Image (cartoon, grey):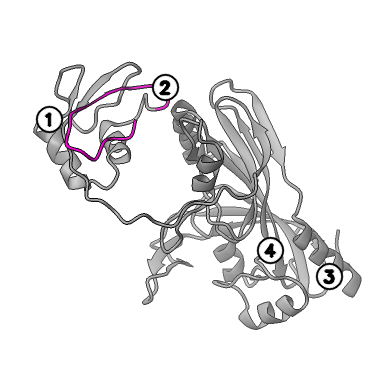
Amino acid sequence: MALSKAPAVSHVRVDEGSAGQRIDNFLVRECKGVPKSHIYRILRSGEVRVNSRRVDQTYRLQLGDELRIPPIRVAEKEAGPAIPVGKPFDIVFEDEALLVLDKPAGLAVHGGSGVSFGLIEQLRRQRPEAKFLELVHRLDRETSGLLIVAKKRSALTVLHDMMREGKVQKRYLTLVAGRWLNPQQHIKLPLFKYLTEGGERRVCVNPEGKPSHSIVRLLKRWQAYSLVEVELKTGRTHQIRVHLSHSGFPLCGDDKYGDFALNKRLEKEGLKRMFLHAAKLSFHHPLTDQLIELSASLPAELEEFVVAVEQAGQREYG
């Protein structure tokens, strides 16, 4: 349903993949390169018609709606770097509504902010026949593990609601510096997002931040490190990294909130990435309500480092 760059009226029939979407968001997606201000102007002026009627920007598209989109001239853009097909992703679960894959570390989930492409762009490149593929949530670039992608807009909408309501259980594995003592501990610290002078996104504990809740469970402990499982009750940006670092237990290999001197030593010892892995997901299917419980083992490079820690020092717990 891509629009022609030549000025001509476009007629589009809404399919299952677009049903339920607000018309302004639909037009932003369809009219790539057109400023949002122009999208809202043609909606207000009535140049966009749905079933021959005017609608405002809050209208939600229905299956079978007929859209008339006026001629829009889009400035030609220089072609960006081609998105490589890449190695097929490890699919942990898939049906007609969604898929869950095991994301490798080092790959952003989407392009932007200096990244020309990410996982979702590669996935679309690998599956050119797919009409709809959208991220349900995000993982940091250096985090590996389970990631949900919606294949239907109806599934995406329900999954977003489930995320907001805390109905998707997410558990991560991480190795932290220090001796974590409590078998289970709740961390409830408000998190505040800000930008550094260089324009980088950062998060800190701040009373003005959003309420954030993590549950930390001790799995193994050695003299210098602890392997813990963290269950997210909220899903704030960098939540695990900031909650644990603020508590005095920085993630091994974390280049934003970690112990930088320790990270240099760990790199020489074989840990060349942040030790954070999305290991478990549990949720009810958005369309069938079937319980889905999934897990992804630690990647080889993290498992090997745990073995090295085990061999280097006596285990105190677990």
Q: Is residue 25 left or right of residue 52?
A: right
Q: Are marks 4 and 3 in contact (CB under 8 Å)?
A: no
The reply to whether residue 53 is in sight is yes
Amino acid type at mark 4: Phe
- Report how far apart the C-alphas of labels 1 and 4 lie in the structure: 52 Å
Quadrant position of the N terminus in the picture: top left
Q: Are marks 3 and 1 in contact (CB under 8 Å)?
A: no
Amino acid type at mark 3: Val
Local SS, label 1: loop
What residue is shown with label 3? Answer: 309
- Report how far apart the C-alphas of labels 4 and 3 lie in the structure: 13 Å
What residue is shown with label 1? Answer: 47
Chief SS of the magenta region = loop
Residue 16 got which mark? 2
Residue 275 got which mark? 4
Residue 15 in the magenta stretch? The answer is: yes
Q: What is the x, y in percent for residue 32?
A: 30, 44
Name the residue: 39% across, 56% down: 80
